[in-house]
Amino acid sequence: MAYVPLADSDNVTEMHHPHSFVEKYVWSQDHKVIAIQYGGLAVFTGVVGLVLSLLFRLQLGFPETATFIDPSFYYQAVTMHGMIMVVYLLTALFLGGFGNYMIPLMCGARDMVFPFLNMLSVWVFLVSVIILMASFFVSGGPTGGGWTLYPPQTNLAGTPGHDMGIVLMLISLAVFIVAATMGGLNYVVTVLQYRCRGLTMMRLPLTVWGIFVATLLALFAFPALLVSAIMMLFDILLGTSFFMPAIIESGTPLDHNGGSPILFQHLFWFFGHPEVYIVALPAFGLVSDVLSVHARKNIFGYRMMVWAIIAIGGLSFIVWAHHMYVSGMHPYFGFFFATTTLIIAVPTALKVYNWILTLWEGDIRLNAPMYFAIGFIFTFIHGGITGLFLGNVVIDLPLSDSYFVVAHFHMVMGVSPVLVVFAAIYHWYPLVTGRMFNEGMAKLHFWCTFLGTYAIYLPMHYLGFLGVPRRYYALGTTDFIPASAQDLNTTITVAALFVGAAQLLFFINIIWSLRSGPKAEPNPWGAASLEWQTPDTPPIHGNWGASLPTVYRWAYDYSVPGADKDFISQDTPENSEPGKDS
Amino acid sequence: MSFFKSITTKPWERKGVIGGLEPEGAFESANEKVALSIFLVVASVVFSLFTVGYFLRMELPDWRPLSEPSQLWFNTGLLIASSLLFQWAKNITRKADGKNLKLAFFGGGVLAILFIAGQLMTWESLQNAGYFLTSNPANAFYYLMTGLHAAHLLGGLWVWSKSSIRLLSGEDAAELKLSVELCTLYWHFLLIVWFILFALLSNT
């Protein structure tokens, strides 16, 4: 089929062109600038979360050495660390950061469908972060009720931040959900409606698939958090009893009566479990692309990978109660959720096999992004398998609320996605900045982070088996926890401080390389997907010059037999491939 | 191509341009309509979860159902009329002359404002009758769910007021076609939600 490209085949409506510095970098409607704003803000909150974790680790590793960490501050640090990392760092970074940057470029579009709404999304996200951070400065400090915010404990005197802290947390979450919904509508509609000519859904890179399905999960799961936040705010501020049971606080009976704390748990986890996959699916997508590019091989089982993403997305809505086995549920109810939990492991395992088979006999280039991507496979298998343990009711009951759980979810949704974040930042750094980072420093960063996090979380599994409970300020003395558990805790803290400090390597590298890194070639890794084929590197406003690209193939034509180069970009016409006649 | 067919194609086998000379979206509707449709699903999830919460909370022993004010029937009539006027406005934008568009579009919005005022009056009469927010979870759910529905309607009225200004500034029916269509879709959605909420509140 012969095809003459149409110079004006651009159906994109008139673009908003910036005229001043402020319009270009502050009130920007360019998806790339918004991506950097979203990502930067998310990473900033992430650093706050990291510092908080180091502080409470100090208390656990060296009890009573850091005198400023009293029990209240400890609980506040644990709570804020959890919420910040899950929602404000990972969700915002994957959807707002990577989603914004990658979707229009990988779809061959000039921008998002609704650029103004997109801009609004990032500013509303900023408001939610400001409200969240404000809770550190109000009387009583931030909430210390644990990141799950379970009532009635969170709202009662005795829990730090039970007055202003929890209110600000709930308002901040509600505002965040507004921001995520505005952004999410944009991402979904852009993927559905703004793909360039020839780019069918099944030609999209897995990055887009992962972010697309994760965004749908966010759109349909965040309402549960919104609903629980609204009802809890009513309970706290207006004195209703949606969740608050009849209860006595410091000897005084409260006005609440008959509320159901379990109802809150159901609503929270109906959001909370899809949230795990809101974080995981974009990571799955990004890591698939990084592995494929650096192994110079097409992703193994592309269709299976897409179906697995969709299946995981669907199943993630019917596993939530596995977080609540100890809440006293009907055994059949637990049986149902244990079954669905084990079923969701099937498409997840399928993806792991496919990543490994993508590496099989590949022409592997051990670049820094590839280090992180392969590291992810290790940590994800590790965290995934402990998930199978915990998914079974009988194994979960004794391990529930122990350090085994902490180790499990940090491996599977802490370390693993963060390794992908680093893989993706290093991989796309040349595209975003037009510069190369320092490869040696990035690899040093990998080894410190990878080995360091194992030093943190592997011993935690043992602590869990010993019966060390999570969330405790100090262990005290018990019959079943040996004194040597404290030595393990000290080791973990030393490793955590080391890993925390090692992140400076990352920040120094990317900031230093921004100015002084060698200039990057337009497509340094030889990637086939569309985002690397822009006329300018980094891509300028509007992305594509005079006309939009046309796509002739999928995103994974690597090492095609008989081809001139070891990759054929998506916008290469089919008749330029030897041996093929159109 | 159907969704099932498209996700079963083997992208590595087929090269070349798929589709026509122009980029194709998954849906033929305007992007705004696709976005609104997805938003309506999101809003449905919000209302559904409140309904689930309502049913679960209702099971507990302290639940005392309130007697809904009969004024709700009148308010429901207002909302139905509002929706009908929007539908009329939408039909007018499809015709060439655009006659009566202002009447239909403004009338629809004004009736919606009256509906919200009517809902506030039910709140007041309930308060006077001693059905306070905190005295029973059934009351709390009543205020919460009617309030949430009204808040959605207020959001719609904000968009309606923007379109109204455009209509007043002399834009013709063809240019406003999409805005009117989206308002109508949103109003119908909120009418259906209100039917469900009304049935739920009055039967439990």
Image (cartoon, rainbow, N blue to C red):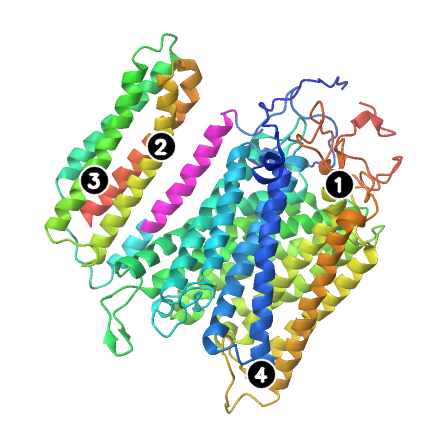
Front position among marks 2 and 4: 4
User: What distance separates the C-alpha of mark 1 from that of mark 2?
Assistant: 46 Å
SS state under label 3 = helix
Coordinates of residue A289 in the picture (x, y in percent): 72, 47
User: What distance separates the C-alpha of mark 2 from that of mark 4?
Assistant: 57 Å
Front position among marks 1 and 3: 3
On the same chain: label 1 and label 3?
Answer: no
Q: In the rendered image, which quarter is residue B188 located in? A: top left
Coordinates of residue A146 in the picture (x, y in percent): 46, 68
Coordinates of residue A570 in the picture (x, y in percent): 75, 33
Q: Amino acid at mark 2?
A: Trp
Crowd rating for badge 3 (residues with CA inside 10 Å; few <14, some 14–19, many 20+): many
Is the residue A165 above or below the residue A121 in the image? below
User: What distance separates the C-alpha of mark 3 from that of mark 4?
Assistant: 59 Å
Q: Amino acid at mark 4?
A: Thr
Decide if residue A519 is on the left or right side of residue A356: right
Q: Amino acid at mark 3?
A: Gln
Q: Which residue is mark 4?
A: A65
Residue A556: image tag? 1
Residue A66: image tag? none
Coordinates of residue A197 in the picture (x, y in percent): 66, 26
Direction left: furthest residue: B129
Is the residue B134 above or below the residue B14 in the image? below
Q: Which residue is mark 2?
A: B158
